[in-house]
Every structure is written in structure tokens, then in C-alpha cells.
Amino acid sequence: MIKKIDNTDLEAAVNLANQVFHEFIAEGYSEEGRQTFTKYLDFKLEEMNEDLISGHKVLWGFYEEGRIVGVIGTRDELHISLMFVDKDYHHRGIARALFDTVLAELKSQHPGDPFVLTVNSSPYAVAVYHRFGFVDIAGEQENNGIRFVPMKLTVSDC
């Protein structure tokens, strides 16, 4: 089941993101990058509730037996800020289902209007975003130790 995450499930979503980051992504980052990401998540937990209420950020969770096993987040509506799936649930279509949910929501908010969805993908997830139709808009970059590839998806079939 997929549903929007509210403050009651926020900590579980942030914990999942942190767990998956350290299992799959952190090894390819410098110590600075690992610390930057951890601080980012700590900020999320403290400040996210206000952002969720204001609509500045939206999180969707994939729930299995009442537990969050996947999460996707957007900020400023048209930017994917995070997407993580528990390792025990990889290759089951959860990332695709979460992405399709976000895309359907955005299409309903922009009926008939084309829009561009962006993401700064970790190197680990670039292939996933390519399968979703995203294209690279620049090569790999690094900011505060965080490695990422800027990508975009132009959606015109609303």
C-alpha cells in the first residue's frame, strides 16, 4: 500500500533512508559526504513536519505489513529529494510504484500542462532513474562530499 507520510511515520521514513544510505551508498562517499547526508536527515527529522504541513515537501511511503519499506520525497513540487527502498524489498517494483504515484499526483496537479521533474541522483540510483525515463543534464558532481548526477524528466503527456 502506498500513502502520503505524515508526522506519525516520519521518523520511520527517515530511519529507512539512513539505513539504506549506509548499506548501499555511503561506501562511495567521502567522510564529509557521509556526515553531510546524516546531518541532512537529522534536519529532515527536526524540520520536516513543518515542511509537510506547508506542502514544501511531500513524502510517500510504501507499506508492507504496516511497515515502511520504501519512501520517495519531493520538494518544491517538481524535484525528487529522496528515494530509498529497504534491501529486502529491492527488485520488487517498489521504487517504480512510488515514482508512478508521484508522477500521477503531479500530472493531476498540472492537467494538460507539460512540466519538468528533476532529481540529483546518487551514482547508485542513476540506472533506476534512466529506467524511469530521466536523462542526465550534466556529469557527476560533488557538493559537500555528496556525489550526484543531475537529471530531468520532461513530462508532456498530461
Image: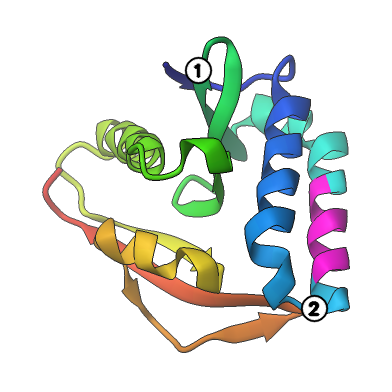
- Which label lies toward us, 2 or 1? 1
Majority secondary structure of the magenta segment? helix
Image quadrant assignment for residue 107: top left
Q: Does residue 52 show up?
A: yes
Q: Is residue 72 visible?
A: no
Tag shown at residue 34: none
- x then y, percent, for residue 102: 38, 37
Q: The N terminus lies in which quarter of the figure?
A: top left
Q: Who is closer to the viewer here, 118 or 61?
A: 61
Kind of residue at disc 2:
Asn
Dot 2 or dot 1: first in sequence order is: 1
Q: Give me the residue at 84% from left, 56% from top.
A: 38
Between 53 and 123, the residue placed more toward the observer is 123
Rendered residue at 74%/56% (across/down): 22
Disc 1: CA contacts within 10 A as few (<14), some (14-19) or many (>=20): few
Region in magenta: 34-41
Residue 56: x %, y % from top left? 62, 40
Establish if 108 lies above or below 25: above
Where does the C terminus fall, quadrant-wise? top left
Residue placed under numbered mark 1 in the picture: 64
The residue singled out by tag 2 in the image is 144
Magenta residue check for 40 = yes
How far is mark 2 from mark 1, CA to CA? Answer: 34 Å
